[in-house]
Amino acid sequence: MGRGKIVIQRIDNSTSRQVTFSKRRSGLLKKAKELAILCDAEVGVTIFSSTGKLYEYSNTSMKSIIGRYTKTKDEHHQLLNPGSEVKFWQSEAATLRQQLQDLHENHRKMMGEGLYGLSAKDLQRLENQLEISLRGVRMKKEQILAEEIQELSRKGSFIHQENVELYKKVKLIEQENMELYKKAYGTRDLNATNGTALVPFGFTMSMEQHVPIELQLSQPAPQIETPVRDIESR
């Protein structure tokens, strides 16, 4: 069975009025909280009871919400009045020009220009500002250098580890080649001086392997000629 409609008018009974106020207040604050969370809105609710008691809810700061409301309301009224709008933008432009001029003057002073008219106290304050700025720049530079050194150290450690792994692989390959050589040619000495031993890939020998071989040919023995008359007499 649905709920009946309630006439929206002041409740005469004080007890019923207080109960209804408590229920409706809780529901209103709950809806305000849900609206702030679901819609990412800046919500502020202020409630004064008939007895003057204050109830409020804000998802940020009630003071900032009220200040924002007042500023927005004033700007809205100014936009409705063309003359006020022109004055508003003229005031904004004058403020921005003054800020730009102040920044330009401060920049010149930081660069050591336009120091005329400054007292010793003003110069001391300017010097302190420059020292603070210089200290901040040095700290930032040292931080960047420390990070770069740390990164280079990390890369150096990584490269050293890679070199160690490669050295182990080379040693393993040399050992495998030696085993293969022993299986193929037996246990002959690799440093044999006859120069006929084969050396596996990756090994060196102290003897020169590319010395040309010199062959010495013996001269033919001389033949003894037999006289023809001796042959005929025989």
Image (tube, rainbow, N blue to C red):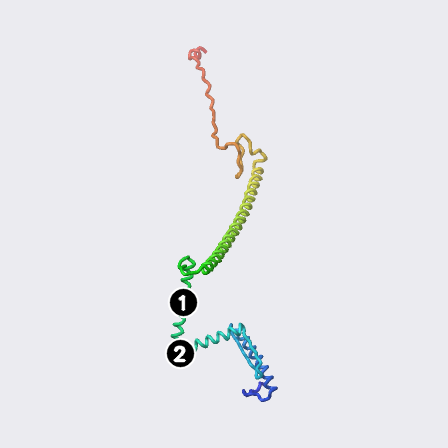
Q: Is mark 1 on a helix, strand or loop?
A: helix
The relative height of residue 232 versus residue 185 in the rendered view (above or below) is above
Q: Identify which residue is drawn at 60% across, 87% down.
A: 14
Q: Identify which residue is drawn at 39% across, 69% down.
A: 94
- Tell me the quarter of the image containing the N terminus: bottom right
Image check: 31 left or right of 106? right
Pointer 1 residue: 98
Q: How crowded is mark 1: few (under 14 residues within 10 Å), some or many (20 or more)?
A: few
Q: Where is residue 119 in the image (x, y as percent from the top left)?
A: 44, 60
Q: Based on the displayed image, in which of its 4 quarters is residue 21 positioned?
A: bottom right
Q: Which of 151 and 136 is in front in this view?
A: 136
The relative height of residue 213 versus residue 102 in the rendered view (above or below) is above
Residue 41 seen in the figure:
no
Q: Earlier in the sequence, mark 2 or mark 1?
A: 2
User: Of the residues shown, which amino acid type is indicated by label 2?
Assistant: Asn
Gap in angstroms between the C-alphas marked 2 and 1:
26 Å
Q: Tell which residue pokes out farthest to the bottom in this image.
A: 12
Pointer 2 residue: 81
Q: Tell which residue pokes out farthest to the top in this image.
A: 233
Of the two numbered discs 2 and 1 in the rendering, the one whose residue sits closer to the viewer: 1
Q: Based on the displayed image, in which of its 4 quarters is residue 4 positioned?
A: bottom right
User: Of the residues shown, which amino acid type is indicated by label 1?
Assistant: Gln
Q: Which of 195 and 85 is in front in this view?
A: 85
